[in-house]
Amino acid sequence: MYEKDQSFLEEILEQENDLFKLNKQMLRATKIKDFFRSKEELNVWRDWLNKGQLNVGPREFGDFQTPPNLAERVCKVILSHNINPTVVIEPTYGKGNFINTSLKYFRDLKKVYGVEIQRHYEYFFKMSRTMLADNLENELNNDCVIEVYHDDFFKHEFPEELLTENDELLVIGNPPWITVAELSRLSSSNIPEKSNLKGFSGIEAMTGKSNFDISEYILMKLLDLLSKVKKGTLAILCKNSITKNIVHLTSRRNWNITTMKLFNFDAKKEFGVATDASLFFVRVGESGKERIQTCEVYNLDDPDSRIRVFGWVNDRFVSDVESYKESYKIDNKCPLVWRSGVKHDCSKIMELKVQDNNELQNGLKEVVDLEDTLVYSLVKSSDLKKETVNQSRKKVIITQSKVGQDTSYIKEASPKLWKYLNEHREHLDKRKSSIYKNNPDFSIFGIGGYSFAPYKVAISGMYKKSKFSLVSPINGKPVMLDDTCYFLSFNRYLDAVFTMLILNSDLVQKFLSSITFLDTKRPYNKDNLMRIDLLKAAKNISFDEILEAIKDYGLCVPAVSEDDYNDFIERLEKQPLSFFKDELEVANSQLALQI
Ligand SMILES: C[S@@+](CC[C@H](N)C(=O)[O-])C[C@H]1O[C@@H](n2cnc3c(N)ncnc32)[C@H](O)[C@@H]1O
């Protein structure tokens, strides 16, 4: 693998055994200070060259090494902002592609400082420098010195002299792509210590989330570091979900950020990872510039065309500042309550496919014969593609009408179902989520009177489109939605029609797009849906526009008048409970259709 340099290194190591003299030669050849730190290290190198195997301990996950071409594109963005760093820090340098590229691009560099936790990368990086030894004149400043440390970023103390206002400091790199939960599963020691985390105000709440990426801690620490220096630049590759959290934190942290940009790139192409990722480019303490809390978004392939700006507008966090400014008037609180669909975590047993011959089949491919009593039509995210939904190929078993209800009543109410559930108990009992522990047998969640409302206006939480659908009863029975969907409940068809049309209106769609982050797993959730002020949105649409939309959608609405619409608005304002009330009563009587 390293044939070309084997002879060069072998020669040096054969001729000389004095660490000081060896390091002097290596500094000249590679710019690396203290290339060999100890006699033991010399032996590791000799072993590597003799046996062809590097033996320096285990490897961790999360390390996608940055391709040199991508590192070059990052350096070009930095140069295009007229930044010429004198000091570069690579906090997790890996094979060191960012270090080598920085040396090629930045003419005023005096020092490059790298930290890396995995020992074998230190060796790989040093080896890569010996490969470049003949070509160091291609690097722009021959006086530059490289210092690299085998250490844990979270424990590493960056020396004071590295962090001075007199230098143009650039922190560049690509921290590990791994969550705290994944690290814990690997029993890794590479988890930031609790004591460290407590230093971050408000972080405790976030650390509870298992999908918390360690890159996020690294970015926070780096921004703290730059704030200490008072000025500098950060150019870090990371997932968009992380940068979103960091931009969100700018309102609570004392970071004097004066420029904040994202340059999206194709993470699948560069790292084989199906996630949205970017170069996060941040400048701290530029003179003559105000502190900001918004981030501009570009494409790394087209770094001059701004796509959007996201971040804080007053005290609201938005995904598109321009669209938000045009629609912020409906940013308030929805007078009706958004709910999520039913959760059972056992689709094999609880969900049944309706066969062509109308027989029901479960996920074990068994034909199932059950009473209709506790079996309901089920609509999933993928069924919410049209404005109106009134058929479904799936059914779901609903064992409770409210969370925690004793399920022993099923024995009497639906004996065949009781037998079926007991026969398949092992599948239900092994559900992992702790919510099922200490709850009645066959429990479900996301269930309440609202689930049994005849009409629902629903949206998929997972899809990118913000389309709302009107879900009507099937065969006279309310339809259930699964836990990937969110919905509002209605007793009356007309209320549901008006609501669906208002939610699909331009103003609401613009507002939703301005507060929604499409690169998150669940772009639409209870939090952002509850922000839609349905009343203000309703007042913004005239009855004529409603009539036109009814026609466009081809909805069947008998004799609707302007008075109906005014009554709808008035009740939204004064009696929001009139849209869906007496939840359990409705559940028990199953339906009170009022078309
Ligand atoms: C995504 S890789 C990128 C490597 C390099 N920065 C690059 O851009 O090619 C992340 C690197 O972080 C290193 N790393 C992980 N945890 C670390 C820690 N706590 N301290 C220092 N380095 C760490 C990994 O070993 C890996 O080399």
Image: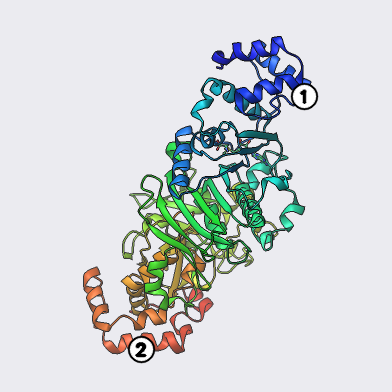
Of tags 1 and 2, the one toward the viewer is: 1
Q: Is residue 578 visible?
A: yes
Q: Amino acid at mark 2?
A: Asp
Q: Nearer the viewer, residue 212 or 116?
A: 116
Residue lying at 64% horizontally and 66% vertically, measured from the top left: 406
Spatial distance from mark 1 to mark 2, Cα to Cα?
84 Å
Position above or below: 5 against 594: above
What numbered label is drawn on residue 567? 2
Q: Quadrant of residue 551?
A: bottom left
Task: List x then y, in percent, for residue 263.
Answer: 44, 49
Q: Residues within 10 Å of mark 1 (few under 14, many from 20)?
A: few
Residue tagged by mark 1?
A: 38
Residue lying at 33% horizontally and 81% vertically, measured from the top left: 540
Residue lying at 76% horizontally and 20% vertically, measured from the top left: 19
- Which quadrant is the C terminus positioned in? bottom left
Q: Nearer the viewer, residue 558 or 563?
A: 563
Q: Is residue 472 visible?
A: no
Task: List x then y, in percent, for residue 69.
Answer: 44, 34
Q: Amino acid at mark 1?
A: Ser
Task: List x then y, in percent, for residue 443.
Answer: 60, 60
Q: Earlier in the sequence, mark 1 or mark 2?
A: 1
In the rendered view, does 542 fall on the left or right side of 593?
A: left
Q: Quadrant of residue 496?
A: bottom left
Position above or below: 523 against 263: below
Q: Nearer the viewer, residue 35 or 365?
A: 35
Q: Nearer the viewer, residue 519 or 101?
A: 101
Badges 1 and 2: C-beta atoms under 8 Å apart? no
Position above or below: 285 against 146: below
The response on whether ligand 1 sits within 8 Å of label 2 is no
Task: List x then y, in percent, for residue 389.
Answer: 34, 64
**Judging from the image, what secondary structure is the residue with disc 2 in?**
helix
